[in-house]
Each structure stands twice: as structure tokens, then as C-alpha cells.
């Protein structure tokens, strides 16, 4: 838990010091921390991931080629689908069989969009296979039935002779898929049914009873957690059904005013620090959730799944307000890197995290052009943070302490100047990621590597001239570059980072 990294930030220090303890490394960073979330929302699925096999846009079996290749390069470990709020109005039978026979639907949650159901169970699970990632299905508890959920699980995962497996074969898939994660409802306190926790806990017992394991497929069952700081929901859930679930979800967005969330691109330093303060507060939320879980589950069998998180701003001008399309600046990159740093420190409970969302929605990895769909996709600063952090996936966390000053914000926020995470991969190579949170000043970080002796250091930096900078169609100005600001002096590693930047180093 928090002992993996202690922070002692003092207002008097000018630079930061990181002291690592490689000989104490024993915590594991599961790759699922780098999970993705794909909901039927705006242009995430249609026009983002899926364009159809007959589209003039280059595609691989209907999946947009440049988006697919970008996700493949990211080595996505797990993807959640079909929602989100959409999941509790989704009826899976409408999304199977010949495309021309699938009924359309109106996406009443997100902008009243008409969808043709051409992207359904087969299309999602085949995508996961092509990407080499695990599938995380969100089941419909809000408007669905126990029978509907049970049959969906059988359709996807049974290799037997039952009618659902036979129907799958008729629809072109002989062997069942592997489905590793199944969510029994989504945000059941809100869009998933407006339920009270006692009611949901009893409902979970019933639905969960029929989420069977077929043909050797072993599913982890994820209950719907409460709103981020609803600790009573977590307490009741752990007490009543903690022995019947593999984990429960936590959703956390850096928002405190849902009516005025602010602009994704037009902001000043105070707005920047406000959002960073909100995003960093996820750590206290995680600590509080873990304290409740420890009370009922000291052996830590139940996981915490942060399966929705990120920034949420007002949509870009002229966009459908129900599509949640926002740009992605260096501010989002800093939110991403510091959030991942936090998640790494609590992997004794956090088994997965899914940034919201993968394409064209909220803190997206990738953007496609609504007005010129054939334009090449845009890789966002958040995408590049994930790419730079890939060495930490399935690595061993190296514990350490950080001593740093607080960013000067007129006393409004308690924000450290820097954040870090360090790990050792399966080949024994150390990787160190450091973020300079300060919007205006560069900082030099002294890194003490304990018993490890530095021979070589190399890495990449993600930076921009202005914290408001972003990548746009035909204008990619933020991408990783070779980092030359690290040197070894008297056995100590000195790293000088420009303002609002992220660095990942390979230390040998």
C-alpha cells in the first residue's frame, strides 16, 4: 500500500530527491492497470473503432486500420465494453446475426444517436482476439433480465451442444471466446437503475448466481461500486456479497462541478492546478476504499477495479453535447502519468484501471476526424504517456521516497512539484518515469538508486511549449523525443525536466 512510496514535500526545498530501494522490490504492477474502455458513446465505436468492412476508409475486417494499429502498438491488456450507461440499455441479441437483419436502436443515454447494431458481440470479442487483449463485458442489470445475462454468457463461452452455443456457431463462430471479466451491472446507483445499495446487493446475489463458467472459461465477476466517495455503498457491498465477487468498480473523474466542467483547451495555470488537485485526490479515495475492504477482507482476495477514470471537460464548440468529444492537451498527459503513478502504489488491491475512453470520447487515446473521416487518426498526449509507460506493465514496483517542494499556488492546493514511479522488468532492467507537474518551472531531480550502480541511462520525454498545447488533425506537435537531460554525477542520477513534462528512463 502507501508504504511503497512515502512523500515528504516541504515548501523550502528547491529541487526533488528520489531515493529508490531496488533490493526491497516485491510488489507486482499488473498490466491490467493500463486497460481501456470502449462505450457506445459518440464516435467511440462507430467512426472510431468500427467503420465496417465495406468502408472506403482503410480497415481490417471492419476495424479502422490506423486506430487498430495504434491500439496494437499500445499492447492493450484489457478492454471494457459496451458501457458505461449504455450497457444497461443494451440487449445483446440485437447485435448478433446477419448485419442486414439486426434491428437499429436509439442511444438514449448519449445524444439520441441512431445505431445500426453492426458492432456487437462478435465484433467486440473478435477485436479483443486480434489485439491480444482480455475482454471485460458489462452486463445489463438495469433493464435486462437474469435469463438474458445467463444466455449471453453461455452464447459467448460455451463449447457444448446447447441452443446458445449452436446459435453462435450458426452466426459464424465455431469455438467459444474467452471472457475473463464480467461486470454485473454498471453504476447501479445512477444510470444503471437508481438503486439503493441494499437492493443492489440482493440483486447482485441473484444475477451473479447465473453468470456460469462454461467449458473451462473462468470469469472474474465485478460488482458495481458506488459513486467514488460513497463509502457506505462499499461497506454494505463488502459485508453482504464480498464473498461472492472478485471485485467491485470505482469510477473517478477529475470533476467537481458537473454543470460547468471547464474547457479542455482554454485554461490558465489556476485551472490547470485545480484539475491536477482533483485528479491527485483519487489517492485518498483509494485509501478510504481500501480501508473498508481490509475490514472485511484482510487477505485481499477482492480487487478494486478503477474501470472508469480520467478528465471530463465541456465538449468542444459545435459538437453534439451528448458525444463527450474533448481535445487532449499536455494537462491530460500530466493527469495520466500522475494517476498511473498512484495506481502502481496500490496494486495489492487495484487489479485493473480503464481510462475513459479509447477513441473520440473524454480523455481519449485516439481521435478521428468527424468531418473528414479519411484523415489519419490523431494520437493524443495521453496515448503517448501510455506508450512511454509500457515498460511498467507486468513489472516489479521499486519502492522509494520522494522529497520535493510544493508548487506555489497561493496556498490553494497541496500539489508536489514532481511525481514518479519506478519498476524492474522481467529482464532485470530498471525503468524510471518522472513527471514535472510544475506548469512554469523546470526542476532537477536527484535520484539515489540504492545498491544499483548506474552504467547507462537513456529515455524519452513528452513535453510542449505550453500546457494548453494539443495534437490536431494535420498538426502533431506533442510526441516523445529523445531525452538528453539525465546525467550521472558522483554515483547519483540527476534528471532535469522542463516544465509540464513526462520522462521515462531506462537505467542500466
Image: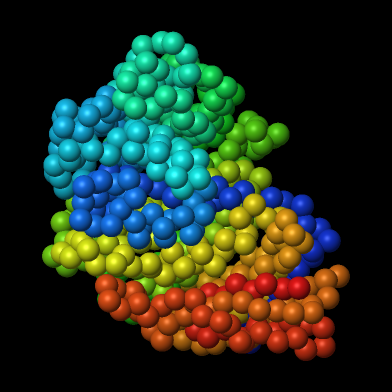
Residue 313 seen in this snapshot:
no
Residue 48 seen in this snapshot:
yes
Displayed quadrant of residue 376: bottom left
Which percent across, then down, holds residue 64? 31, 54
For the point 46% across and 55% down, the residue is: 72
Most extreme residue toward the top is 162
Q: Is residue 253 left or right of residue 337?
A: left
Which percent across, then down, holds residue 449? 78, 73
Q: Is residue 136 above or below residue 420?
A: above
Q: Is residue 262 left or right of residue 152?
A: left
Residue in front for this viewpoint, 313 or 132: 132
Residue in front for this viewpoint, 356 or 406: 356
Displayed quadrant of residue 230: top left
Q: How many marks?
A: 0
Which percent across, then down, holds residue 40? 27, 44
Q: Is residue 145 above or below residue 292?
A: above
For the point 44% across and 11% down, the residue is: 161
Q: Is residue 227 left or right of residue 6?
A: left
For the point 79% across and 65% down, the residue is: 21
Which percent across, then down, holds residue 96? 27, 28
For the point 79% across and 79% down, the residue is: 455
Amino acid at each position: 500500500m502507501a508504504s511503497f512510496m512515502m512523500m515528504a514535500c516541504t515548501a523550502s526545498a528547491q529541487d526533488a530527491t528520489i531515493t529508490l530501494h531496488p533490493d526491497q522490490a516485491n510488489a507486482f504492477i499488473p498490466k491490467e492497470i493500463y486497460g481501456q474502455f470502449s462505450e457506445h458513446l459518440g464516435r467511440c465505436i462507430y467512426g472510431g473503432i468500427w467503420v465496417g468492412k465495406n468502408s472506403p476508409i482503410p480497415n481490417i475486417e471492419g476495424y479502422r486500420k490506423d486506430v487498430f494499429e495504434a491500439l496494437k502498438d499500445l499492447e492493450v491488456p484489457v478492454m471494457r465494453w459496451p458501457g458505461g450507461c449504455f450497457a444497461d440499455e443494451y440487449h445483446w441479441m440485437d447485435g448478433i446475426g446477419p448485419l442486414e437483419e439486426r434491428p437499429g436502436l436509439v442511444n438514449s443515454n448519449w445524444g439520441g444517436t441512431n445505431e445500426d447494431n453492426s458492432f456487437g458481440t462478435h465484433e467486440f470479442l473478435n477485436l479483443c482476439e486480434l489485439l491480444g487483449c482480455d475482454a471485460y463485458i458489462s452486463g445489463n442489470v438495469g433493464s435486462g433480465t437474469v435469463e438474458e445475462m445467463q444466455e449471453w454468457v453461455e452464447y459467448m463461452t460455451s463449447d457444448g451442444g446447447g441452443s446458445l452455443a449452436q446459435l453462435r456457431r450458426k452466426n459464424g463462430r465455431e469455438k467459444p471466446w474467452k471472457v475473463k471479466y464480467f461486470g454485473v451491472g454498471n453504476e447501479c446507483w445512477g444510470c444503471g437503475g437508481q438503486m439503493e445499495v441494499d437492493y443492489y446487493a440482493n440483486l447482485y446475489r441473484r444475477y451473479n448466481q447465473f453468470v456460469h463458467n462454461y467449458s473451462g472459461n473462468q470469469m472474474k465477476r465485478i460488482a458495481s461500486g458506488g459513486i467514488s466517495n460513497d463509502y457506505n455503498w462499499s461497506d454494505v457491498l463488502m459485508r453482504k456479497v464480498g464473498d461472492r465477487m472478485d471485485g467491485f468498480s470505482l469510477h473517478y473523474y477529475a470533476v467537481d462541478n458537473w454543470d460547468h466542467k471547464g474547457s479542455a483547451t482554454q485554461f490558465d495555470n489556476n485551472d490547470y492546478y485545480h484539475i491536477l488537485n482533483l485528479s491527485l485526490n483519487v489517492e485518498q479515495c483509494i485509501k478510504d476504499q481500501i480501508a473498508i475492504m481490509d475490514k472485511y477482507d484482510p487477505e485481499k482476495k477482492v480487487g478494486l477495479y478503477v474501470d472508469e477514470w480520467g478528465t471530463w471537460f465541456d465538449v468542444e464548440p459545435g459538437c453534439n453535447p451528448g458525444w463527450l468529444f474533448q481535445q487532449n492537451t499536455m494537462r491530460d498527459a500530466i493527469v495520466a502519468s500522475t494517476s498511473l503513478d498512484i495506481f502502481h502504489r496500490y496494486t495489492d488491491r487495484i487489479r485493473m484501471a480503464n481510462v475513459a475512453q479509447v477513441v473520440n470520447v473524454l480523455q481519449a487515446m485516439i481521435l478521428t476526424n468527424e468531418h473528414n473521416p479519411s484523415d489519419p487518426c490523431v494520437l493524443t498526449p495521453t496515448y503517448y504517456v501510455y506508450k512511454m509507460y509500457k515498460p511498467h506493465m507486468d513489472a516489479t514496483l521499486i519502492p522509494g521516497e520522494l522529497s520535493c517542494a510544493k508548487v506555489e499556488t497561493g496556498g490553494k492546493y497541496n500539489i508536489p512539484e514532481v511525481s514518479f514511479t519506478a519498476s524492474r522488468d522481467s529482464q532485470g532492467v530498471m525503468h524510471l518515469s518522472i513527471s514535472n507537474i510544475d506548469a512554469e518551472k523546470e526542476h532537477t531531480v536527484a535520484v539515489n538508486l540504492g545498491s544499483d550502480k548506474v552504467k547507462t541511462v537513456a529515455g524519452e520525454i513528452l513535453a510542449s511549449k505550453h500546457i494548453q498545447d494539443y495534437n490536431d488533425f494535420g498538426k502533431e506537435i506533442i510526441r516523445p523525443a529523445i531525452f538528453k537531460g539525465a546525467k550521472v554525477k558522483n554515483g547519483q542520477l540527476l534528471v532535469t525536466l522542463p516544465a509540464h513534462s513526462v520522462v521515462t528512463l531506462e537505467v542500466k
